[in-house]
Image (spheres, rainbow, N blue to C red):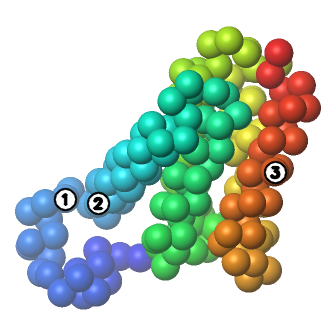
């Protein structure tokens, strides 16, 4: 587990400077994740306007997947620590943040087609399935575009499986 002293050393700032901005390392993490989620949300909005002005369910989920992949691969040095084998707190924190976004997304975009299961269970199923696919693809050194294509196909299969009625 990383300490505030290590963060300060790597960022080349004093502990006093750190504590003038944050109460602890968890507040820094909250701030960092908020910035990343804002970036992913903006990316999603741009993808929706360009690729899916009708806000079709499947296309919306694919755009969400693209926004997540874009964020993940652009911050890979950080996100490699969020894997189950890495820092457990970061893994849990990242997972809960993504799951919360997917739940909110499912509530917003599933007005015409309702999930077969509860929103929470449907979101957890999609989140875990896609995270497992992305993680396994990255560990096998699959190129990003192949991962993106395969993850979208897996998502389409899930969405067509009767998950939404």
Residue 138 picture quarter: bottom right
Q: Looking at the picture, tell me which residue is in the foreground, 89 or 122.
A: 122
User: Which residue is labeled 2 in the image?
Assistant: 28
Q: Residue at x 91, y 32 (%)?
A: 161
Q: Is residue 85 visible?
A: no
Q: Looking at the picture, tell me which residue is in the foreground, 80 or 148.
A: 148
Against 5, residue 117 (above or below) is above
Asked whether, in this view, residue 62 is left or right of residue 71, the answer is: right
Asked whether, in this view, residue 88 is left or right of residue 137, the answer is: left
Residue 20, percent across and down?
8, 62
User: Which residue is labeled 1 in the image?
Assistant: 22
Counting residues from the N terminus, which is met first, the one under dot 2 or under dot 1?
Answer: 1
Q: Which residue, as the protein is rendered here, is positioned at the far right?
A: 161
Q: Residue at x 66, y 72 (%)?
A: 144
Residue 97, percent across and down?
51, 45
Q: Residue at x 74, y 82 (%)?
A: 141
User: Which residue is labeled 3 in the image?
Assistant: 153
| SS at mark 3 in the image | helix
């Amino acid at each position: 587990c990383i300490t505030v002293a290590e963060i300060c050393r790597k960022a080349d700032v004093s502990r006093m400077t750190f504590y003038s901005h944050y109460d602890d390392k968890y507040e820094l993490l909250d701030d960092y994740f908020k910035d990343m989620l804002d970036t992913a949300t903006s990316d999603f909005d741009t993808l929706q306007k360009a690729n899916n002005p009708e806000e079709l369910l499947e296309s919306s989920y694919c755009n969400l997947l693209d926004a997540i992949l874009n964020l993940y691969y652009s911050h890979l040095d950080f996100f490699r620590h969020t894997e189950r084998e890495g820092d457990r707190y970061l893994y849990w924190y990242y997972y809960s943040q993504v799951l919360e976004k997917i739940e909110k997304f499912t509530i917003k975009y599933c007005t015409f087609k309702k999930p077969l299961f509860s929103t929470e269970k449907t979101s957890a199923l999609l989140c875990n399935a896609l995270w497992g696919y992305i993680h396994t693809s990255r560990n096998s050194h699959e190129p990003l575009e192949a991962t993106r294509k395969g993850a979208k196909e897996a998502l389409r299969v899930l969405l067509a499986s009767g998950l939404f009625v």
